[in-house]
Each structure stands twice: as structure tokens, then as C-alpha cells.
Amino acid sequence: MKFSDLLRMSASNLLRRKLRTVLTVLGVLIGTASIVVMISLGLGLQKSSLEQIEQYGGLTTIDVYNWSSYSSSEVDTDTLIDDEVVAEIAAIPHVEVASPILSVSVLAKFGGYEAWLTVRGMSQEALQSMDIEVGEGSLPSDSDTLEFFYGNQVITDFYKAKTYEYYWETGELPDVDLMNDSIFFIFDTDAYYSSQYDSSVSSPKKYLVPASGMMAGGVDEYQDNCYYVLADIDALTAQLKKVFKNSVIPGQPSTKSGKAYKDIYYEEVYVRVDDMNNVSEVMEAIQNMGYTASSNAEWMEQTQQQMSMIQLVLGGIGAVSLFVAAIGIANTMMMSIYERTKEIGIIKVLGCDLKDIRTMFLMEAGVIGVFGGLIGLILSEIISFIINQVAGGASGGYYSGISYIPIWLIGVALVFAVLVGMLAGFFPALRAMRLSPLAAIRNE
């Protein structure tokens, strides 16, 4: 029997009992939509978690610390992080970038506004590798002139000097243009506060630092470094040495006599690894050097384990619906055999191959799976859209992508629905093959 004849007979048999066919397709439809929506919720949560972790610095970066470097008292300089230590870290296999981070707290003043800002000096290589989206201007250059690159939420640190009112209290952004206004910075903040309460102490010098650029994003969009002011580390070091001359730079250790060391020490190192799979190996090497190392990849591993369990549970719940639909298909096919027993006997007597009979019933079950799967996928897309709209509206857009249906899930779900249909029709098809032709013909 030709394949086209088998297909025509299968379609004819399904259309003969329209209501039963529709109800069976409806079961597959509900089962497919259930399992796709359930899995999409797990994938959406995983995707959201990944995006949040990316906002905190990515999955291939490592933060190296040495907390003792915060002390201003005499310490063992052999335990501190200097340029030699950074060079050793950079030589570790799989490390692409290793940059010291020099942090300093400064007081910014413009008109009636003030702000305490944290300036982080980093190497040019590190600044370029951080994938910072520039909204205006550019990243700090490697020139000798100190330039500041502002995070998108730095503006919210400015407050009215007289009332101490911040943006988060008033809802109004400070009247400060970080890119164009002449903002003065005080690096020697200890001397500044001493001069406020002791008239014998001279006010420290204010410095005008030009802006190189600003990070893209609104004041309500959190991302890595959004609260920091970034600068070229060499230019920042030169500026600090100029301001403090032979004095101890805040955050730097001092000798027993209170003098500054010749070298600059760092409390943190930015490390970028070539691949997320190598992060653990690099972290272990850094920890063996005696330093503290942390990475977002650790969070991601834990998150993936949790998300895998959630997807397994949600997928299992959806699979129950599809299992029920499979029972419905099997029931439909068995009823079809009972109703067509005489027909099966006649085509057997006429010489129809047993494999053709099996193929015909499997095709009927497969067609039910195809239509149920296709309509179920359309329904799951609609449900997913509604879930995202409701969740996004309720959370102010924070959970707008809680349901995520990738292309591969659509293909897998459709193939799975067809396979479930054909597996459900397999045993009824075997029963049809085994019917005795004479007994089938006599059947009324």
C-alpha cells in the first residue's frame, strides 16, 4: 500500500469521529502547553539569575583581596599586594587580565552640592576588558592628566550641603552636570574636616578634574561599578603622590615612624579569566598564594544546581499532563480498533501487509501528536506572554522575563509530543496487526 493511501485512510478515520479526535488533540494540547510553560518558568528564572550575576561583574572575573592592606599601622609588607604580586597573578595560566585597584575616597563639591565618592584606579587593559557600556564621552585615557569616568548612579550620591537631602529622599536629581560642570575634588579629606573644626588648620587644596565620560543607564539601573568613579591607575597614583607628597596616602600602610613607603600597595586586584570553566583553577592558585579570592562563578554553580532542581520539578508536573494525554490517545486508538475490526479483517484478506496496518495506526496517533503539539506551543507562547506581562507589571519590570521559551524548547516539545502520540498508539497498532482476519470479518 502506498504511503499516500495510508495517509489518506488515517485522515479519513480521524475525521470520521471528529469529536473524539478533537478531545484527544485537546489532551495533547494541554499536556504540551503545561510542560513547555513549566520548563519555561525554570529557564526564565535561570536566565534572570544569570543576567543579575552578569550585572555584578560577570562570570569570568575574580576579585582578589588582602584585608590587612586597609590598616594604616605598620604591617608586614610581604603580605600586602604590590605590583610584583599582581605580575605573579597575571602569570597564572588562563589569566587574561590582572590589574591592581587603587581606591580612594574623595569629597566632590559643586555649588551647594557635595558628594562622597569612591575613585577606583585601574589599568587601561582592565578598563577596556570590563565591557562597560559608555553612555557619553569615553573611558579614561592613558594620558598623564587625571580624568574621571562616572558610573550611572554616581549622581545620586550628591546631596545639598545645607540640608543633606539626597535624591532618594526628594526624588529630584541634583542640579549637577557631571560631564560639563566644573566640579572640584578634595583628596585630603582628613585635613578638610580638621579645618572645619579647627581654625588653625588650613583648608586643603581643591582640584578640578575633567570628566572623560559616563556609563550608560538611568539612575535606577544597577550594574557593576555604577556607584564608582573610574580612573587610570597611573594618573591617579601620580595625583595622590602630588597631593600628599611625602605624607601617607589614606589606605596605605606606614612605617613604625609613621612615614610612607616608597611603593604603592593595593587592597584589591581585578582578574579576568579566559573561560568560566577555568575560574576555579585560577582561584585555587591565588588562594595558595595566601590571598582571598571570590568570583560570581561560585554563585552561578549554586544557582545552576538550584535551577536544575526547579526545572526538574516543574517539568515533572507538566509531564504528568502529557502522560494523561498519552492515555487518552491510547484509548482513542483502542476504540478505533474495536469499531474497525471488520475493516481491518477485510484489508488483511485483500493482502494488506501487516506493517502497513501498523503504520496506519501509528500515523493516526502521530497526527494527533502533531496537531496537539503545534496548538499547544501556540497556547504556551500566549500563556508565557501573559505571565511576563503580569509579573513585569506587578514588579515594575523587574520580573518581565520570568517565562522564557527558547527555540530549542519549541522543537523538542513538538518532537516529544509526536513521539508520545506514536508510543501511545504503538500497542493498539500491534493489537490491530494480531487480529485474526476470519474472526475480524465475522465481527459485527
Image: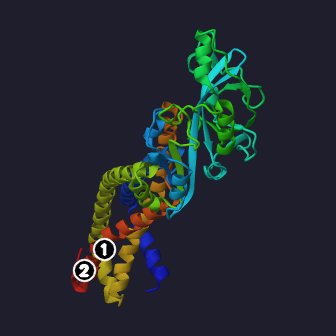
Could you say whether the residue bearing mark 2 is in a helix, strand or loop? helix
Question: Residue 238's image quarter?
Answer: top right
> In the image, which disc is placed on residue 426?
1
Task: Please name the amino acid that badge 2 sits on.
Answer: Ala
> Where does label 2 land, which residue?
440
Residue 258 place in picture, x, y as percent? 52, 31
Which residue does the image show at 48% across and 47% down from the upper left?
Answer: 63
Amino acid found under the numbered disc labelled 1: Phe
Q: Position of residue 393 (x, y in %)?
A: 52, 32
Above/below status of 165 relative to 236: above
Compared to residue 207, the image places residue 20 above or below, namely: below
**Could you classify mark 2 by the number of other residues whose Cα lies within 10 Å: few (under 14), some (14-19), or many (20 or more)?**
some
Residue 89: where, in percent of width, then height?
50, 57
- Here the colouring is rainbow
Viewer-proximal residue, 126 or 443? Answer: 126
Residue drawn at x 66%, y 33% is: 245
Residue 44 visible in this rendered orientation of the protein: no
Instruction: Give the Cα distance between marks 1 and 2.
Output: 20 Å
Q: Is residue 119 left or right of residue 7?
A: right
